[in-house]
Image (tube, rainbow, N blue to C red):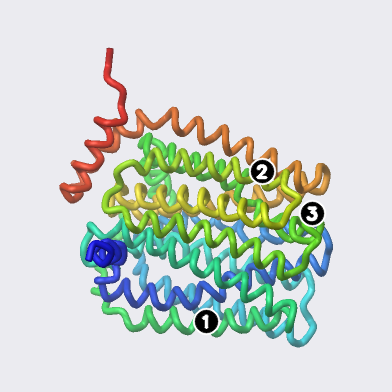
Amino acid sequence: MASTIEWGGTLRALRSRNYRLFFAGQSVSLIGTWMTRLAMSWLVYQLTDSAFLLGLTTFVGQIPAFFVAPIAGVWLDRWNRHRVLVITQVLAMIQSLALAALAFTHYINLSWVIGLALFQGLINAFDMPARQAFVVEMIEDRGDLGNAIALNSSMVNGAKLVGPAIAGVLVAAAGVGVCFLLDGISYIAVIYSLAAMRVAPAQPRVAQKSALQELSEGWKYVVESPAIRSILLLLALVSVIGMPYTVLMPLIAADVLHGGAHTLGFLMAMSGVGALASAIGLAMRRTVLGLGKRIAISAALFGGGLVLLGLSRSLAVSLLLMALTGFGMMQQMAGSNTILQTIAADDKRGRVMSFYTLAILGMNPIGSLLAGSVAAKLGVPATMVGAGGICLAASVWFYWKLPEIRRVIRPIYRELGILPEIAEGIESATILQTPPEN
């Protein structure tokens, strides 16, 4: 009975019909997305045999978020987010089917890959903040918000576990085109789920300021909040320094571990195992109590995993370390998302989540280009060790900032009228974790 109650609490966000539809559709679609990610990285490696061009392709595919996401957040605070998501999913399906057609007709080359990666990057600059901000509109009980965000992470990382493993087998057996085709077909599931939702018509918000004025207002809101500012700074630093390790994984698989596409698939799948375990653990939590400390610890785990991964020459050890890095990365991202979504003002949610997108997708391409360049000169192992060391240092800085974050987060919860059990959890955390004054 206790186990049933616990898992019922773990899945409580699924009580909301719209979120249940979204969860089912995305669970299918994201498997295809991760298949395409692995297939594209392996394709670029086969076409170029270059660490730099691997980094460049990822850079091009994610750099639109750096320039577009902040202003997209302004528009998302004005537009119907449900309609935006339908449009982005249709466009993403077209992109995947175009990759499949080029691969099957043997017209695929680096220029096409980079061009379509850029197109997907533009889509993601709108899709990611819209999806994050729309979570609140899908759930019927505001108290289920943290659980919904954690289940989103579980969904992403379940797909990250299954997708690369399937893609590694399919690439070796049938080529990359099959992965692109299956990804394109998988978008039907999420498009159907969005179409089946019952969404109350949103009242259009009349813009009384220019987009640039509202962008400036959103930036000021982020900068003046020590909690939001510190969380986003840590995310941005880990994104630019640590997360681009995925760009180097084809070289780890082929040059360091002397494997093939299946080796890359297993490595990425193990990262998904760790991330999935992390997300499930977060889903079982009932309050945000202690999430700040968890963010600091998870960043340290991620950095330490990268250092050891750079030193490893054993496939078995590397697989375990990939699970550790996946766990740490997801714990930080999902924990940060939960706090940000909970404390962000409703009329600024789109802008806050656009800066969250900027911190992850926008900074990651700069790191991918940097990682590819450094790896081309110093080698992949040294690049991994250096990146991990910097992430470890960043986790220490964030831990040092926790007392200030705790002091400001309590009044924010009170001001926003968050559920009493959550507010009590934050207060208890502050009492327990803040040292007494002398």
How many neighbours does mark 3 have within 10 angstroms: few (below 14), some (14-19), or many (20 or more)?
some
Q: Secondary structure at mark 1?
A: helix
Please tell me which residue lies in front, 350 or 17: 17
In the shown orientation, is residue 405 left or right of residue 371?
Answer: left
The residue where tag 1 is placed is: 186
The residue where tag 2 is placed is: 308
Using the image, tell me which numbered label, if any, was put on residue 167: none
Q: Secondary structure at mark 2?
A: helix
Q: Quadrant of residue 56?
A: bottom right
Q: Position of residue 341 (x, y in %)?
A: 34, 52
What whole-number distance in Å separates the C-alpha atoms at marks 3 and 1?
Answer: 34 Å
- Residue type at tag 3: Val
Q: Residue furthest top?
A: 438
Whether pointer 3 and pointer 1 mark residues with C-beta atoms closer than 8 Å, the reply is no
Q: Residue at x 35, y 58 (%)?
A: 283
Kindly tell me whether residue 137 is visible in this rendering. no
Q: Nearer the viewer, mark 2 or mark 1?
A: 2
- Answer above or below: position of 201 versus 49: below
The residue where tag 3 is placed is: 256
